[in-house]
Image: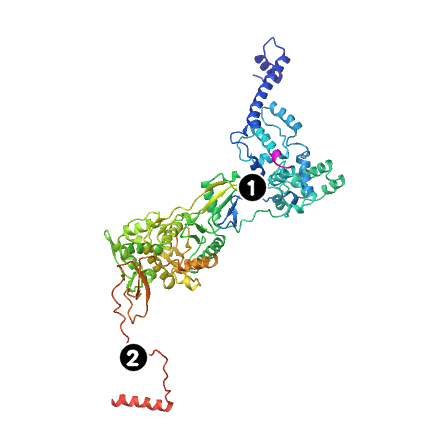
């Protein structure tokens, strides 16, 4: 069938709707009156809800909230001393006061966006009626009538409201406009606008846009450059001079002509500035985030999980437990050491496709507050190794073996064999060996831990029972699976750096389990508390006397054991800790603590592989710990006495080689504290009185023999040997 002519089809449609006896003009007027009535009713409902009501279901902002509002710069993250750490979100905005924005820049925006800004009360009624009629005609929003105040309302309190492009949203915008006009001066509103407005390329506000486009602050812009900024709000992407220079130039010149038309500049000035070339900065401006602490990704993730709408409350402040100096030192130490670990692998003749990774966690053993956190190198984000990487701790797990032993009645002076050992597992026999197959024979528990004897640790774990070792680790805070098999005593399980460090805290604080805390509270811009986390009550999980003895043993690791690197690098004061190295040297650890800080470092590769044949925690992890500690932490002077023995312990002077009471002739002596009833009672019978050769307490002088007499005596000795007399 051939297509009907448009007029014929229109007539047929009209005939179906229009009574035969009703003139067309009457029918059209009646239809328009019906549509108009319906529109008025709809507008009335919307107006009552939004204008006279409560700005929708979420309500209007308070008058104090309007006065306190400032354009968001992405929120603030601060450390425990309220020092700035970084931004929650990357918002490319730099707020500046109105008097820092040149008059000609302000005038460019006024001429382009709202020439009657200082004359109206927030609404340009002529524009309102004109746009409303057009919108009713099309039953939707087709034309705008925004003033600068309305744009402030839209880009501040309405920015997160999800009403779509509807008349309802427009009426709420009008209501907010009136509230803003009633609470703020015109200059305050203009300042908000110039800091809020989006100007393309991710830039918000005139200062950020000026830095991005022209490479300088807004207070240094020329008239033509200011006009270029004012040309952007109409279409930030359409008029960006980087992508569309000719279109941007035409739009800029239009702004200059509007400035002349409104008397801000003369026609001659406008013509002169229209001929000025566009000089755009070669490099795009970005806020400096390259030096932000490596812990911020973890903080942002935590904020997103506990308060995902934080930024909807304006520029919130997140108060963390971090210490800025400690965090900076941690960042440097991990980045420096991962480079060295990578080189170590290369020097060993191995090809390296990826750089080594590292993690560091440092917390206050008294409260659990995290003082420094590094989840990996800056080059690889999204996965926080300190929180989520499951790696074998190796010998860094051994303190829990010895904690179980102390609870079972052993002491640091208890003797254990450091000789090859065999453990039957079903039908097989497991024979772990010491590092470089070195054995010391019979030694004390303290010595076994100091030298990190594998054979001794396995014997101790078999004596007290693996289930009791698991229980000791669980009590202190290890939450990862702990299978019941002999190799677990040597750290053949997987843990995260965070849980291992937190589990060392009871050793440092007298037996109390802590709960790590990273964020203290979140506050809105006006100080309203949005979220908080108090310090969780500590649970007693160890006998304070056992904790003291473990600390005493771990101090020996640092002073004369596998972690002596700590002392060699200049760390002074009370320090305890344990190194860890896994099979094939794929992971290296050191967890160390003082009375006020417990910190652990791990290094390895995301895809496990040997670092180097002789890599160890003492060689590669302990130096990073020392670097962090010396450059990021200052131990309070009073902390030197924090590790005093708990009440009820008895002190004995022992021979550290055999654990017996030190005798008169023992070459080494050590003050050791014991739980009553566990102290040694036998005096050392190994080191007896010295040989009969004289021992001189004071330097002695002897006559110097005559050289001739010395020669004669020598000849005499030879003759006596020959003739045996």
Q: Position of residue 100 (x, y in %)?
A: 65, 45
Q: Position of residue 294 (x, y in %)?
A: 48, 50
Q: Nearer the viewer, residue 371 or 185?
A: 185
Secondary structure of the residue carrying tag 2 is: loop
The local crowd at label 2, few if under 14, some if 14 to 19, many if 20 or more residues have their Cα within 10 Å, is: few
> Could you tell whether 724 is left or right of 610 in the image?
left
Residue at label 1? 72
Q: Which residues are magenta?
A: 180-185
Q: Position of residue 173 (x, y in %)?
A: 58, 31
Q: Is residue 141 visible?
A: yes
The local crowd at label 1, few if under 14, some if 14 to 19, many if 20 or more residues have their Cα within 10 Å, is: many
Task: Kindly give the residue lying farthest to the left in the view shown.
Answer: 427
Residue at label 2? 693
Q: Residue at x 32, y 67 (%)?
A: 669
Magenta region, main secondary structure: helix
Q: Which quarter of the rendered picture does the C terminus lie within?
A: bottom left
Q: Which quarter of the rendered picture does the N terminus lie within?
A: top right
Q: Residue at x 36, y 85 (%)?
A: 702
Task: Kindly give the residue lying farthest to the right in the view shown.
Answer: 268
Contact? badges 1 and 2 (CB < 8 Å): no
Q: Nearer the viewer, residue 354 or 148?
A: 148
Q: Is residue 201 visible?
A: no
- Of labels 1 and 2, earlier in sequence is 1
**Would you place residue 95 above or below residue 432 in this image?**
above
> Could you tell whether 205 is left or right of 500 in the image?
right
**Would you place residue 209 above or below residue 438 in this image?**
above
Q: Nearer the viewer, residue 213 or 332?
A: 332
Task: Kindly give the residue lying farthest to the front in the view shown.
Answer: 647
Q: Nearer the viewer, residue 511 or 490?
A: 511
Q: What is the spatial separation of the Cα atoms under label 1 and label 2, in whole angstroms?
A: 85 Å
Splitting the image into 4 quarters, where does residue 554 fall?
bottom left
């Amino acid at each position: 069938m051939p297509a009907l002519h448009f007029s014929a089809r229109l007539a047929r449609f009209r005939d179906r709707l229009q009574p035969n006896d009703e003139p067309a003009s009457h029918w059209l007027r009646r239809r328009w009156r019906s549509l108009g009535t319906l529109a008025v009713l709809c507008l009335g409902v919307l107006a009552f809800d939004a204008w006279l009501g409560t700005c929708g279901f979420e309500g209007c902002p308070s008058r104090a909230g309007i006065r306190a509002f400032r354009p968001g710069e992405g929120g603030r993250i601060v450390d425990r001393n309220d020092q700035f750490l970084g931004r929650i979100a990357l918002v490319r905005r730099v707020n500046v006061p109105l008097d820092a924005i040149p008059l000609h820049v302000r005038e460019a925006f006024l001429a382009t966006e709202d020439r009657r800004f200082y004359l109206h009360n927030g609404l340009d009624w002529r524009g309102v009626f004109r746009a409303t009629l057009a919108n009713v005609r099309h039953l939707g929003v087709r034309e705008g009538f925004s003033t600068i105040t309305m744009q402030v309302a839209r880009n501040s309190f309405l920015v997160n409201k999800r009403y779509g492009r509807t008349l309802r949203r427009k009426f709420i915008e009008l209501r907010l406009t009136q509230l803003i006009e009633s609470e703020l001066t015109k200059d305050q509103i203009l300042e908000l606008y110039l800091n809020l407005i989006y100007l393309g390329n991710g830039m918000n506000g005139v200062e950020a846009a000026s830095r991005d486009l022209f490479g300088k602050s807004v207070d240094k812009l020329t008239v033509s450059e200011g006009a270029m900024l004012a040309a952007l709000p109409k279409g930030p992407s359409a008029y960006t001079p980087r992508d569309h220079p000719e279109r941007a130039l035409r739009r800029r010149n239009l702004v200059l002509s509007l400035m002349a038309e409104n008397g801000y500049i003369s026609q001659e000035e406008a013509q002169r500035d229209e001929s000025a070339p566009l000089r755009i900065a070669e490099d795009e401006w970005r806020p400096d985030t390259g030096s932000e602490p490596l812990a911020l990704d973890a903080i942002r993730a935590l904020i997103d999980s506990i308060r995902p709408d934080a930024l909807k409350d304006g520029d919130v402040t997140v108060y963390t437990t971090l210490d800025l100096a400690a965090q900076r030192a941690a960042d440097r130490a991990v980045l420096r050491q991962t480079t060295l670990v990578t080189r170590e692998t290369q020097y060993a003749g191995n090809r390296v496709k990826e750089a080594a990774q590292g993690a560091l966690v440092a917390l206050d053993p008294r409260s659990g507050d995290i003082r420094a956190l590094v989840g990996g190198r800056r080059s690889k984000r999204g996965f926080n190794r300190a929180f989520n990487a499951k790696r074998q701790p190796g010998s860094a797990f051994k303190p829990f073996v010895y904690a179980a032993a102390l609870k079972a009645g052993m002491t640091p002076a208890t003797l254990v064999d450091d000789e090859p050992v065999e453990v039957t597992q079903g039908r097989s026999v497991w024979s772990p060996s010491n590092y470089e197959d070195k054995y010391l024979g019979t030694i004390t528990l303290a010595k076994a831990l100091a030298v990190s004897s594998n054979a001794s640790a396995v014997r101790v774990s078999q004596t007290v029972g693996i289930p009791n070792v698991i229980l000791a680790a669980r009590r202190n805070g290890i939450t990862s699976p702990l299978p019941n098999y002999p190799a677990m005593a040597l750290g053949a399980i997987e843990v995260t750096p965070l849980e291992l460090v937190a589990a060392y805290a009871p050793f440092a604080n007298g037996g109390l389990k802590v709960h790590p805390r990273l964020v203290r509270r979140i506050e809105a811009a006006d100080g309203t508390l949005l979220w908080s986390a108090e310090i969780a009550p500590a649970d007693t999980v160890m006998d304070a006397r056992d904790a003291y003895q473990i600390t005493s043993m771990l101090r020996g690791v640092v002073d004369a054991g596998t972690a002596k690197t700590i002392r060699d690098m200049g760390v002074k004061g009370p320090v305890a800790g344990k190194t860890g190295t896994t099979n094939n040297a794929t992971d290296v650890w050191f967890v160390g603590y003082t009375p006020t800080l417990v910190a652990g470092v791990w290094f390895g590769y995301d895809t496990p592989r040997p670092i180097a044949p002789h890599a160890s925690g003492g060689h590669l992890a302990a130096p990073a710990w020392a670097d962090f500690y010396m450059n990021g932490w200052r131990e309070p002077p009073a902390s030197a006495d924090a590790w005093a023995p708990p009440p009820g312990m008895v002190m004995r002077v022992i021979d550290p080689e055999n654990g017996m009471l030190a005798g008169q002739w023992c070459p080494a002596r050590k003050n050791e504290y014991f739980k009553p009833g566990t102290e040694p009672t036998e005096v050392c019978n190994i080191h007896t009185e010295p040989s009969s050769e004289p021992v001189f307490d004071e330097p002695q002088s002897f006559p110097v023999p005559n050289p001739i007499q010395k020669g004669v005596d020598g000849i005499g000795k030879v003759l006596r040997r020959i003739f045996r007399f």
